[in-house]
Image: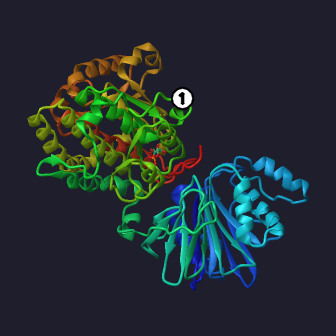
Amino acid sequence: MCGIVGYIGKEQAAPILLDGLARLEYRGYDSAGVCVAEQGLLHVVKSKGRLQNLCEKTDNGRTLPGCVGIGHTRWATHGEPNDINSHPHLSQNGRIALVHNGIIENYLELREALEEKGIVFTSDTDSEVVAQLLEYCLREAGSVLDALYMVLHRIEGAYALGIICADEPDKMYAARKDAPLLLGYGDGCSYIASDVTALVKYTREVSYMEDGEVAILTRDNITVLNAMELPVQKEHHHIDWEVSAAEKGGYPHFMFKEIMEEPEALRRAIHPRIKDGRIDLGNLNLTKEMLQGLRRLYIVACGSSYHVGMVGKYNIEKLTRMPVEVTLASEFRYCDPIVDDRTLVIIISQSGETLDTMAALREAKARGARILSIVNVVGSSIARESDDVLYTWAGPEIAVATTKAYSTQLAVLNILTIELAHLLGTVTDERYLQLVAELQRIPEKLDTVLESRETIQYYASQYFNHNSVFFIGRNVDFALGLEGSLKLKEISYIHSEAYASGELKHGTISLIEDGTLVVALGTYGALFDKAMSNVVEVKARGANVLALTTESKASQMKKNADGMLIIPDTEDLFLPSLGVVPLQLFAYYVALQRGCDIDKPRNLAKSVTVE
Ligand code: F6R
């Protein structure tokens, strides 16, 4: 949430800042702004709404001179999205400019204290208090750096900060606590950014700031100090993916591109982890003894990542007979979870920065649990704080609605599931080898699912004007329905709900009337007959049924469904891996028909770094 970028070098800063912001816009798109230092003054330009407005105002940054600057794209928390509340914020004397991602929890108290001292605030934001406090502390402190440390001791909450000062035009400052921020090392220039996507066009050498660290950037050097103001030697990381991975590459939307990339992303997630037909999880130190010693296994995540966990619960319990508890991270952290050193907590996160998930991780770790995370963004906070990490290697995911990250998370969780069953001896070696072999065929099967996209587009054109949709299914089909429903509602703004089919009769069926669209998921063979009965029940009450099933069950399902989405047959374990893609495409085409802003749905942002 909120994207930050900063540049100090020899080039004109503003065009670089705007280019970086364009790649960060998925983090928030309520407003955007930049500030550059030039001839002893700070120049700020901000604009409500999309970044395009700011680009137009500044002729893509060309009208703003200056070789040092900071930029911000905002997801509003405190104060409505307008020009005044947009970042960068200036201190009262206009000599300090600041961009902030996160929430300053004690901002009201600090603001009141500063107002009593005569400082006049212009915005409603929590962020402005940091700029004002910095100016105030500078009256007493010997340097901007000293003043910054004074500020950091007084503010509470989460922050990634980028700061420039008119009186120190050759420096930029950055600080981080519980919000992502990385440093980029260029040739005669230095950068800060919330995410590598903003920097990869300019430099591939980055380091990740840790909580409590402060960075002082000049053109030629970046010095990092810890909370005790002692120098820190930062490890440099090389970013090896191509710039094009974060560009649309001719596709109309990032979401569509990312769906089309799923087979390839799955190959990257699966194939390096299979050696000679067997799973090889590298350094992941799982043993039979350790697994048998476990008292509890939790899966903790938010949103779609949580839905992956829901599928995982069914699959892990089926294959290993270990009980699994799947919990929303936002609930886990406040429910006094029963966790100790005989608990394994699997954390799932695309961004690796989701605040609730991060807090849940820390809570579990503090109680002694071992943390195994499944993460996409390499070097992200969750990855760094986990005991073990399995990366999904999906590549950058830009569309706010996740697609390829969901699929790769699920693939990695399936690999882990099979490995757990193998280690525990709950599957025979023969069965283990069968599952591993089928796992490797999933990307090709997904290619065939994508080939049927015109059929899916056709159904979207039939149903796009419905106001309310139900997704029903049992077992893994219920878990799949949760994701199908979320995809549809988040990008098309159609109200939709996912129900375990068996629950319909306990209340929800009263909402089914003539023409209600029900997406009936019937991929899971063991419960197919039950799925059919539920289809018949809702049909009898006038529902329009769009069914999702497998090739081998299609002819039976066709007898009752109005429309059919068909996936290839596979092992039960992998049905959701194939089934999710038609649902993603259905949501995509429905949103397209409705003229929605698919990659940037209203009110959302990709990386949820506030609570
Ligand atoms: C929905 C979506 C979100 C995320 C959720 C968790 O399409 O993308 O529901 O799944 O915000 O994000 P991560 O996985 O980054 O922790």
Question: Which residue: 42% across, 22% down?
Answer: 514
Q: Is residue 500 visible?
A: yes
**How many marks overall?**
1
For the view shown, which residue lies furthest in the left direction? 430
Question: Which residue: 84% across, 68% down?
Answer: 139
- Which residue, given by chain and number where applicable, does mark 1 sit on? 336
Percent position of residue 297, x then y: 37, 32
Question: Which residue: 62% across, 62% down?
Answer: 175
Residue 138 located left or right of residue 102: right
The quadrant in which residue 581 appears is top left
Percent position of residue 118, x then y: 91, 59
Position of residue 104 relative to residue 186, above or below, is above
Count residues near mark 1 (Cα–Cα under 10 Å), then give few for <14, some for 14-19, many for 20+.
Answer: few
Residue 608 located left or right of residue 280: right
The quadrant in which residue 83 appears is bottom right
The quadrant in which residue 170 appears is bottom right
- In front here: 270 or 506? 270
Percent position of residue 427, x then y: 16, 31
Position of residue 81 relative to residue 135, above or below, is above
Position of residue 430 relative to residue 119, above or below, is above
Percent position of residue 52, x then y: 58, 66
- Quadrant of the drawing holding the C terminus: top right
- In front here: 396 or 109? 109
- In front here: 25 or 543? 25
For the view shown, which residue lies furthest in the top direction? 506
Question: Which residue: 54% across, 57% down?
Answer: 180
Applied colour scheme: rainbow
Q: Secondary structure at mark 1?
A: loop
Residue 562 located left or right of residue 178: left
Q: Is residue 464 visible?
A: no
Going by the numbered disc 1, the residue's amino acid type is Asp
